[in-house]
Image (spheres, rainbow, N blue to C red):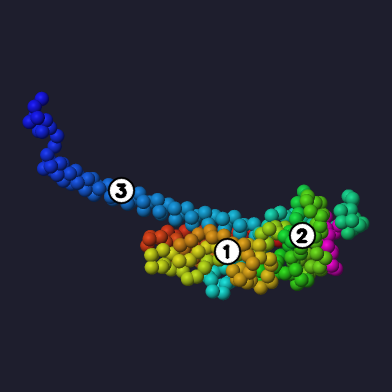
Amino acid sequence: MSLRKLSQLGFTLVEMIVVMVITGIIGGMIAMFIKAPMQSYMDSGRRAEMVDIADTALRRMGRDIRTAVPNSIRTTTCGAVGACLEFLPTKAGGRYRGSAGAGPAQCGGAVASDVLDFGSPDGCFEIIGPQITFVSGVDADHIVIGSTQSSGNPPYEIATSGVLRAYTVPVGAQSAVNFTATQFPAFAEVPGQRFDVVPGDQQAVTYVCTNPQGTDTNNDGQSRLIRYWHYGFRATQTDPATLAATSAVLADKVSSCAITYNAINQRNGLVSITLTITRGGESISLYHETHVNNIP
């Protein structure tokens, strides 16, 4: 093969430029066609994520609230933050002995001592039903008996005006409940003879919608929904952010959040929650209602 023929093999510069121009035009046309579907896919994914975050947060709140001690739910505006909903969760419950039985004594004395006495300070009663596992010490479980007052305060009070008492000893599965021997108020003695156990590792729980609400300069929600727990018990509702509380953020980029509690009557209540999450100027809103049983 001659040198002349070898020099004619391959592409010329003009041919390469033409191919690049044509490829760019085709690529631009393809990008125009796939831009809208890709953007739609990304928007759908963002909306689905926002819905999932809001739905998970509201379902978590609903599960928590359904375990609340009767008449322990209360709401307020907590200091510099927004709406606060507080309640006492339960981990177990049962019935206390209201009259002397025929079995062996469970409270260390005569069988009669197994009966819960409302006429004087009493610190032990027999459980009517299965055994319950208790925890004592620093994070001791607490007992609530006869929470009938709709004010929401007695379940948080250990004094004689309240119905909350700290469990003492022993730990583990028990057939009797030993607790701080402080006399219960007269209204705590109810026909149902039920008691509730508040877990010591949770204590009181508060859900908070922080302020300010609305959106920031990036068109994202600037509020958060936070769960606080393990900060003890307060007779008067207090902003948990000012206490030594454990906390977790359930939802961020919240642009609107409202929590209301309506005590329909002495037996029932309704917690209503509206949660709006905004990202990049796009918002989703969910509404959730949880029925509350206030029969002690």
Kind of residue at badge 1: Tyr
Report the side of 146 relative to 65 (left or right): right
How would you classify the magenta stretch by its main secondary structure? loop
- Residue drawn at x 75%, y 68% is 158
- Quadrant in the picture for residue 71: bottom right
Mark 1 vs mark 2: in front: 2
- Residue drawn at x 45%, y 62% is 253
Kind of residue at badge 2: Gly
Does the magenta run of residues contain 195?
no
Which residue, given by chain and number where applicable, does mark 2 sit on?
A: 137
- Residue drawn at x 18%, y 46% is 25
Kind of residue at badge 3: Pro
Q: Say if mark 2 contacts mark 3, CB within 8 Å.
A: no
Q: CA distance from mark 1 to mark 3?
A: 39 Å
Q: Residues within 10 Å of mark 1 (few under 14, many from 20)?
A: many
Q: Residues within 10 Å of mark 2 (few under 14, many from 20)?
A: few
Does the magenta run of residues contain 124?
yes
- Residue drawn at x 78%, y 50% is 173
Q: Say if mark 1 contacts mark 2, CB within 8 Å.
A: no
Report x, y in % for residue 157: 72, 69
First reached walking from the N terminus: tag 1 or tag 2: 2
Which label sits on residue 37? 3
First reached walking from the N terminus: tag 2 or tag 3: 3
- Quadrant in the picture for residue 293: bottom right
Helix, strand or loop status at disc 2: loop
Helix, strand or loop status at disc 1: strand
Which residue, given by chain and number where applicable, does mark 1 sit on?
A: 207
Q: Quadrant of the N terminus?
A: top left
Report x, y in % for residue 49: 44, 53
Q: Which residues are magenta?
A: 114-128
Furthest toward the bottom, the residue is 79
First reached walking from the N terminus: tag 1 or tag 3: 3
